């Protein structure tokens, strides 16, 4: 291996890559612009849809109105966003209309049950709605809100009539208070989104370069040209590997930067509006989280680059390469599964799961949790996987039919053939025959 | 048996010699000895693509490998360029063993074939610069060398344009310049005129002749008889991985009694398939005694 040759080859790969529209879009523009824009579109979309739902009227049918509670009915009728329909007679017809989407909820007054019957004019209310429909759920909430307010007022009035002082009828109350600071709320959101996007971006950043530098070279017939230069095979492969990893790292870091900017400038204000708390979300991370994220991006890029290049080495065309490398991209979705449980931190078990460990390490760092020994385990696991992939890559390049792109099959077929050939004691086409 | 190593400014790696190898004191730039390549095929079992061939090539000589498709020409040339590793025999380029010094071999070699394309996203000038540097042409002379070649091949006007934008004729010129940019003493042209129009093919032949005049040892493979007839100083007829006959065109004529290379080729192949020795005069698997 000659580092001077590697440097020349590496520069050559980068120069070619930066002139390729697909690579520039996938590894630079998408991480930098597309995902922040997509996030903004999604949040704006959610806000828009929520706004539409807020403005929609609730179409109700009320059955068996209690005569003693005309005030309740007046309150319901008095709400601007509640429309009571009187044409429906019977619970079954109303339920059928709810299922058909022509009605949002049925409010049916029923006689009080058990001890509740002791109170004059008491009743119970059944609200029937369609939980699968947002508008129907919202109607249920509105009715519940009106009923809850009316119940409090009615109970107070009845208790006063019976001479029960307020001190004796007082019940305990449940009061909620979110003690999270705006910074912690921001960290929660960042901890959920950034690791997932970062892992995905690093993987996508490596994807096209990995295919382009292996299968793409074959498809363009430049592979054989490269095989005749005086640099060793090892130097050629090392340069390509470093180039693919570089673009992965670049994609990851650009994406993190863009995410920070967009969370603070776009998503933060949107969420603050939604919660009507100006300080609801603050997007800042501990200083130590930045080097942790960079180290994790590098480790991830080294891993994705190695894994993707091993698989892409079997492809004879760009299309083949995409099909073969796609399973590695699925690995990038692993953090999404763990991301659902936001209170989980890195554990020895998670640290042993490639990709998920790096994502968890990043999330911990964003939340200000630095479990150094588990971070070390995470990096060790990822680097061990890189070593395995590189050993596999070196072994794979020892086979001439793969080197020349004449092998017609996948990694799995190749592995199977090699195992069976070894068992049968047969030589392979150029087995172990890399010329240097 | 290996040829003497010829020192050039490209040589850096010491030549490996094996015990018992006799040093040949000729000036062959390429020496091929009992070269073999077998591979295993699921349906056919062991296939001998190249079956023990011998030849040599000297400075200022165009050595032709003439054979039908699948005869073993490309496999032979790929072994000489160290893309493939021989399963038997040995070969030396500029004194370097293809088995033991592949990098030194490739430094001494310019390889051109239909499957050695250019990088589409680089300009012609960048392409030449890259191949000069990666093949260890002295760094301080790269720029001058690149400009010389741009001038020589008349590609100045489009040297700054990306290769993907160029016509096939322009690409061909850059491709030849790429092959010789590091000034290698040995050149291999594997069916270089395949797919070219007549004018481009003639231009290619003219360049190859020029390179011979410069003292390059050139191995030229083709299945086009007229091309071999016009260009090659010596011709080896290769069939099913074996050299059936090797010599100058005149020697082939004398050995077979045929005048045209096409007839000579058919005569040799038919004789080989009948199991006859039709090579008496032209010396199959020749050593340097068959040289002109």
Image: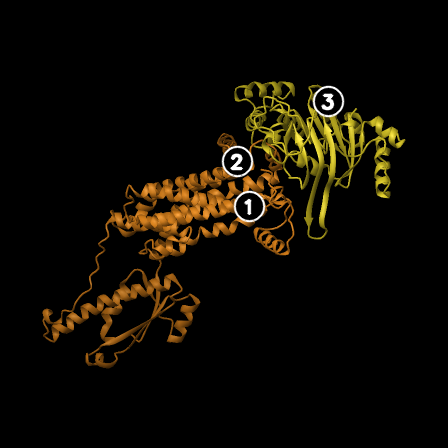
Residue B289 is at least partly visible in this image = yes
Residue A81 to residue B256: above or below: below
Report the residue marked by disc 2. Answer: A235
Chain B representation colour: yellow
* Residue occupying the point 74% across, 31% down: B55
The local crowd at label 3, few if under 14, some if 14 to 19, many if 20 or more residues have their Cα within 10 Å, is: some
Say whether residue B270 is left or right of residue B163. right
Residue A44 is at least partly visible in this image = no
Give the number of the disc on residue A395: 1
The local crowd at label 2, few if under 14, some if 14 to 19, many if 20 or more residues have their Cα within 10 Å, is: many
Chain of the residue that carries numbered disc 1 in the rendered image: A
Q: CA distance from mark 2 to mark 1?
A: 15 Å
Q: Tell me, by letter, which chain the rendering colours orange.
A: A
Are marks 2 and 1 in one subunit?
A: yes
Q: CA distance from mark 2 to mark 3?
A: 34 Å
Say whether residue A141 is left or right of residue B231. left
Q: Callout 2: helix, strand or loop?
A: helix
Which is nearer the N-term, disc 2 or disc 1? 2
Q: Nearer the viewer, residue A212 or A410?
A: A410
Report the residue marked by disc 3. Answer: B209
């Amino acid at each position: 291996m000659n580092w001077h040759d590697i440097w020349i080859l590496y520069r050559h790969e980068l120069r070619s890559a930066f002139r390729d529209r697909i690579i520039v879009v996938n590894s630079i523009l998408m991480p930098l612009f597309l995902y922040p824009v997509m996030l903004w579109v999604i949040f704006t979309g959610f806000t828009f849809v929520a706004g539409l739902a807020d403005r929609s009227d609730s179409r109700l049918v009320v059955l068996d109105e209690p005569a003693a509670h005309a005030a309740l009915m007046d309150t319901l009728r008095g709400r601007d966003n509640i429309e009571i329909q009187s044409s429906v007679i019977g619970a079954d017809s109303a339920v059928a209309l709810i299922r058909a989407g022509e009605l949002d909820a049925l409010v049916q007054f029923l006689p009080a049950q058990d001890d509740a019957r002791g109170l004059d004019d008491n009743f119970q209310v059944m609200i029937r709605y369609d939980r699968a429909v947002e508008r129907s759920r919202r109607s249920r909430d509105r009715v519940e809100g009106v009923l809850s307010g009316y119940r409090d007022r009615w109970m107070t009035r009845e208790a006063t009539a019976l001479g029960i002082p307020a001190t004796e009828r007082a019940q305990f109350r449940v009061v909620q208070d979110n003690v999270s600071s705006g910074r912690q709320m921001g960290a929660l959101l960042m901890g959920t989104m950034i690791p997932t996007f970062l892992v995905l971006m690093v993987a996508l950043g490596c994807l096209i370069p990995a295919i382009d530098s292996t299968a793409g070279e074959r498809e363009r017939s430049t592979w054989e040209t490269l095989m005749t230069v005086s640099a060793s095979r090892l130097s050629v492969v090392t340069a390509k590997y470093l180039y693919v990893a570089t673009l992965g790292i670049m994609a990851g870091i650009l994406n993190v930067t863009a995410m920070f900017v967009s969370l603070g400038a776009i998503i933060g204000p949107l969420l603050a509006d939604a919660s009507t708390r100006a300080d609801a979300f603050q997007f800042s991370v501990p200083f130590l989280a930045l080097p942790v994220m960079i180290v994790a991006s590098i480790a991830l890029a080294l891993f994705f680059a190695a894994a993707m290049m091993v698989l892409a080495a079997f492809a004879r065309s760009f299309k083949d390469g995409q099909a073969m490398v796609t399973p590695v991209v699925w690995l990038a979705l692993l953090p999404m599964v763990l991301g659902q449980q936001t209170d989980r931190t890195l554990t020895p078990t998670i640290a042993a799961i490639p990709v998920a460990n790096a994502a968890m390490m990043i999330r911990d760092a964003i939340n200000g949790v630095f479990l150094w020994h588990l971070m070390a385990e995470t990096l060790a696991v990822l680097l061990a996987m890189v070593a395995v992939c590189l050993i596999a890559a070196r072994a794979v390049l020892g086979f001439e039919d793969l080197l020349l792109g004449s092998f017609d099959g996948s990694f799995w077929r190749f592995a199977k053939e090699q195992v069976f050939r070894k068992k049968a004691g047969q030589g392979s086409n150029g087995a172990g025959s890399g010329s240097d | 048996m290996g040829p003497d190593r010829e020192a050039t400014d490209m040589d850096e790696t010491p030549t490996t010699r094996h015990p018992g190898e006799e040093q040949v004191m000729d000036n062959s730039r390429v020496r091929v000895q009992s070269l073999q390549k077998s591979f295993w095929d699921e349906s056919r079992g062991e296939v001998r693509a190249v079956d023990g061939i011998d030849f040599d090539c000297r400075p200022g000589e165009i050595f032709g490998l003439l054979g039908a498709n699948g005869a073993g020409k490309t496999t032979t040339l790929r072994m000489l360029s160290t893309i493939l590793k021989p399963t038997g025999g040995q070969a030396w380029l500029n004194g370097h063993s293809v088995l033991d010094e592949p990098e030194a071999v490739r430094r001494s070699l310019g390889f051109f074939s239909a499957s050695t394309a250019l990088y589409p996203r680089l300009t012609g000038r960048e392409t030449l610069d890259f191949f000069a540097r990666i093949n260890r042409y002295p760094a301080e002379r790269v720029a001058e060398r690149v400009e010389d070649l741009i001038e020589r091949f008349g590609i100045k006007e489009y040297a700054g344009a990306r290769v993907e934008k160029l016509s096939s004729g322009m690409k061909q010129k850059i491709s030849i310049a790429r092959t010789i940019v590091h000034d290698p003493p040995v050149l291999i042209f594997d069916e270089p005129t395949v797919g070219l129009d007549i004018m481009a093919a003639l231009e290619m032949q003219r360049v190859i002749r020029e390179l011979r005049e410069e003292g390059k040892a050139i191995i030229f493979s083709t299945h086009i008889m007229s091309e071999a007839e016009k260009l090659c100083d010596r011709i080896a007829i290769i069939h099913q991985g074996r050299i059936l006959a090797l010599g100058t065109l005149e020697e082939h004529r004398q050995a077979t009694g045929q005048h045209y290379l096409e007839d000579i080729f058919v005569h040799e192949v038919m004789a080989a398939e009948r199991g006859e020795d039709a090579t008496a005069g032209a010396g199959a698997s020749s050593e340097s005694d068959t040289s002109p």
